[in-house]
């Protein structure tokens, strides 16, 4: 992939804050931090766009009380969902709380519906949806076969 240089003008105080973040997150330099920010910005724009992309992916992170009925409801909702549940990781965070990370694939609508159903369950305490869209590229350097 060819790199392209461009200039950006920003207020000095914004650049100072950005440079502190670059240092804190241990980026190699501003360029990598800007590329990272651009990828996130584009991904969020594509997620919020009117078109309902087919191969949208997401990670739904939830923290909830360890209760058998709630766990049963979570399983049922995932099985009934239109979004494809690619994987789940279940962690016993404390004696009373679990963390679950659910990887999803589907349309924006199907992913949002699943996230909303789960977040509305009694006993769910924290919900965070991380979304992204990865269009197929022409790069053949690293090919996955599933």
Image (cartoon, rainbow, N blue to C red):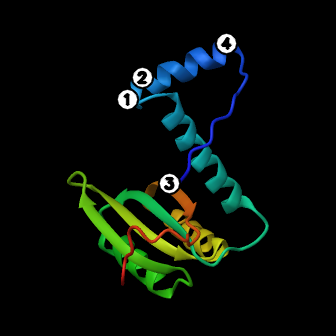
Helix, strand or loop status at disc 4:
helix
User: For the point 64% across and 71% down, which residue is it?
Assistant: 108
Instruction: Determine contact: label 1, label 3, CB under 8 Å.
Output: no
Q: Residue at the left extreme?
A: 95
Q: Residue at the front extreme?
A: 2
**Is residue 63 shown above or below 52?**
above
Helix, strand or loop status at disc 1:
loop
Instruction: Determine contact: label 1, label 4, CB under 8 Å.
Output: no
Distance from Cα at disc 1 to Cα at disc 3: 25 Å
Q: Residue at the right extreme?
A: 50
Of the numbered discs 1 and 4, the one sitting upstream in the chain is 4
Q: Quadrant of residue 64?
A: bottom left
Distance from Cα at disc 2 to Cα at disc 3: 26 Å
**Is residue 41 shown above or below 131?**
above
User: For the point 44% across and 86% down, which residue is it?
Assistant: 79
* Residue at the disc numbered 2: 23
Distance from Cα at disc 2 to Cα at disc 4: 17 Å
Distance from Cα at disc 1 to Cα at disc 4: 21 Å
Residue 128's disc is 3
| Foreground residue among 18 and 93 | 18
User: So how many labels did they put on this image?
Assistant: 4
Of the numbered discs 3 and 4, the one sitting upstream in the chain is 4
* Residue at the disc numbered 4: 12
Instruction: Determine contact: label 2, label 4, CB under 8 Å.
Output: no
Instruction: Determine contact: label 2, label 1, CB under 8 Å.
Output: yes
Helix, strand or loop status at disc 3:
strand
Dot in front, 1 or 3: 1
């Amino acid at each position: 992939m060819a790199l392209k240089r461009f200039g950006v003008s920003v207020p000095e105080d914004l650049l100072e804050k950005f440079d502190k973040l670059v240092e804190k997150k241990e980026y190699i330099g501003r360029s990598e931090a800007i590329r990272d920010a651009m990828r996130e910005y584009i991904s969020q724009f594509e997620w919020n766009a009117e078109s309902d992309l087919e191969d949208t992916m997401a990670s739904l992170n939830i923290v909830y009380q360890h209760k058998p009925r709630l766990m049963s409801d979570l399983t049922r909702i995932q099985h009934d969902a239109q979004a494809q549940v690619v994987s789940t990781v279940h962690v016993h965070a404390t004696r009373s709380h679990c963390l679950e990370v659910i990887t999803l694939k589907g349309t924006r609508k199907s992913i949002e519906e699943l996230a909303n159903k789960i977040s509305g369950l009694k006993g769910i305490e924290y919900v965070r949806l991380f979304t992204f869209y990865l269009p197929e590229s022409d790069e053949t350097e690293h090919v996955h076969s599933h």
